[in-house]
Amino acid sequence: MCISLIKGVIVNDAAELDMYSYLKENPSTKNHHYKTTCAEDEDNRKDASPIYFLSENAPSFLIYVGSKTFTSIISQNKDFVEN
């Protein structure tokens, strides 16, 4: 049996929880792109998105989301919790 050293995670107004879905809905533009963090390869976007690594073995999360934050942050955090 493997015992995880991480017992919990605190997330504060997290962005980029699901860059794969975000960039499908909001493609990069000349001025707003994510080539450095997520590249153009869709597989890399999934690899950079924590939502695709959730499992029953994941530690507990305490998630804070500001009421005046970006709508994409609100929706990604909601999707993250629902998964």
Image (tube, rainbow, N blue to C red):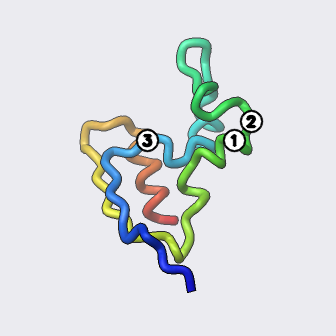
| Image location of residue 17, percent across then percent down | 50, 48
Q: CA distance from mark 2 to mark 3?
A: 19 Å
Q: Could you tell me which secondary element the residue under label 3 belongs to?
A: loop
Please tell me whether residue 3 is drawn above or below residue 8 in the rendered image. below
Q: Looking at the image, do the residues carrying marks 2 and 1 touch, with CB atoms under 8 Å apart? A: yes
Instruction: First in sequence, mark 3 or 1: give its number.
Output: 3
Name the amino acid, label 3: Ala
> What residue sits right under mark 1 in the picture?
44
Q: How many discs mark residues in the rendered view?
A: 3
Identify the image quadrant of residue 5.
bottom left
Within the image, what quadrant is residue 26 found in?
top right
Residue indicated by mark 2: 41
Can you give x and y, in whole percent of width and height, for residue 63 in the image? Answer: 32, 57
Mark toward the start of the polypeptide (2 vs 3): 3
Q: Quadrant of the N terminus?
A: bottom right
What kind of element bears circle 1?
helix
Real-space Cα distance between discs 2 and 1? Answer: 5 Å
